[in-house]
Amino acid sequence: MSALTPRPGIMKIAPYVPGKDSIDGKETIAKLSSNEGALGPSPKAMEAYAKAASELHRYPDGDTSKLRKAIGRHYGLDPARIVCGAGSDEILNLLVRAYCGPGDELLYSQYGFLMYAINALGVGATPVAAPAKDYGSDIDALLAAVTERTRIVCLANPNNPTGTYVTKDDVRRLHAGLPKNVLLIIDAAYAEYVSKNDYESGVELVDQAENVVMTRTFSKIYGLGGLRLGWMYGPAGIVDVMSRLRQPFNVNLAAQIAGIAALEDIAHTDASRTNNDIWLPWLSDELKKLGLAPLPSVGNFVLVGFGSKERAMAANDWLMNDGLIPRLVAGYGLPEHLRITVGTETEVKAVQASLARFVAAKK
């Protein structure tokens, strides 16, 4: 028995379990468990990645200056207020390490991203989940849960795994109700898919406040999940703290080069968004016709209700047998649901056909 004792909270963590990526003994038709970009990475990003091979003996740009400038140009932001990381996961982890600790509370919405609670426990803080409303973030419930120990509020907008979103007015209402010493993190990983007029990714609020940051990722619409690349936009003071805390060379050379190329390939990004605009509503409508209960979603996925845990598990097994990999979400407190990524036309139609056979067989 080791005499070493980990910090308080770490042994309370249930390790994060990612979506499956293969099926034992079966050829996979479609991996739809991790909300990856349906069309894959940009051809320009792949070309840039391949060209980077001869430079792999070099350390990457430790300041990610070219990448930050490219992000700034693309989104109209000040590069000096951008911090890049190994996925937005690293950014979220660094923010919690910087502003939370033993005796503090990190607040998030029920059904929010699992990593919020994991990061809080990792620094000895207490994760607090405010009750959701219609599977989405309830601003009044979040504000009611704020205490003198609250240090961070994490808001996934859009939310994973539910696909719900909070309007820009409600985000501002949430911020207005928070003490100045509480950091509001707006996790906008799926922002590029949202076309709602009342949605705002968080940029405007960051520009107006000292205690708000927005995190983003290249893992979704840009299709670079395998390279682990994310970024944050925030006030100068928080950027300074993050720059002191992050590891040197935390974003690898290939990720930086491919990320810049992906931003420049507007046509590929538009095609990825259009694919989602077409097939997300189509799949949702078809599942409703089958008597299932897909939640309204603004992401590149849909959370489908099957009425019971047993039926959801049976549907999962059925889809897997057909070579289609959905995501079980019992870990989010949603055992009667499956989350299904919106894939290509072929993949989406395969899901519909498989579930149609499932519903017919289980009547």
Image: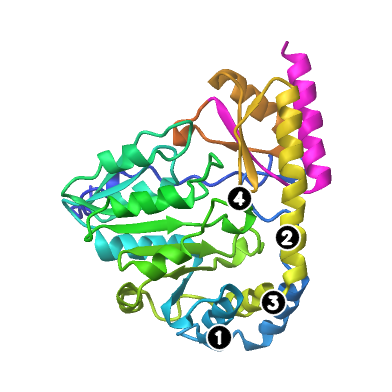
Label 2 CA crowd tier, 10 Å (few <14, some 14–19, many 20+) = some
Residue 170 drawn at (x, y percent)? 42, 47
- Region of the chain picked out in magenta, as a range: 336-363
Q: CA distance from mark 4 to mark 1?
A: 31 Å
* Mark toward the viewer: 3 or 2: 3
- Give the residue type that dot 1 points to: Lys
What amino acid is labelled 3 in the image? Glu
Distance from Cα at disc 4 to Cα at disc 2: 24 Å
Residue topped by disc 4: 196
Q: CA distance from mark 4 to mark 3?
A: 24 Å
Q: Is residue 254 above or below residue 129?
A: below
Q: Quote the CA–CA distance across marks 1 and 3.
A: 13 Å
**Apparent side of residue 184 relative to residue 32 in the rendered image (left or right):** left
Element type at mark 2: loop
Residue at the spot of label 2: 40
Residue 358 within the segment the image draws in magenta: yes
Mark yes or no: residue 118 visible: no
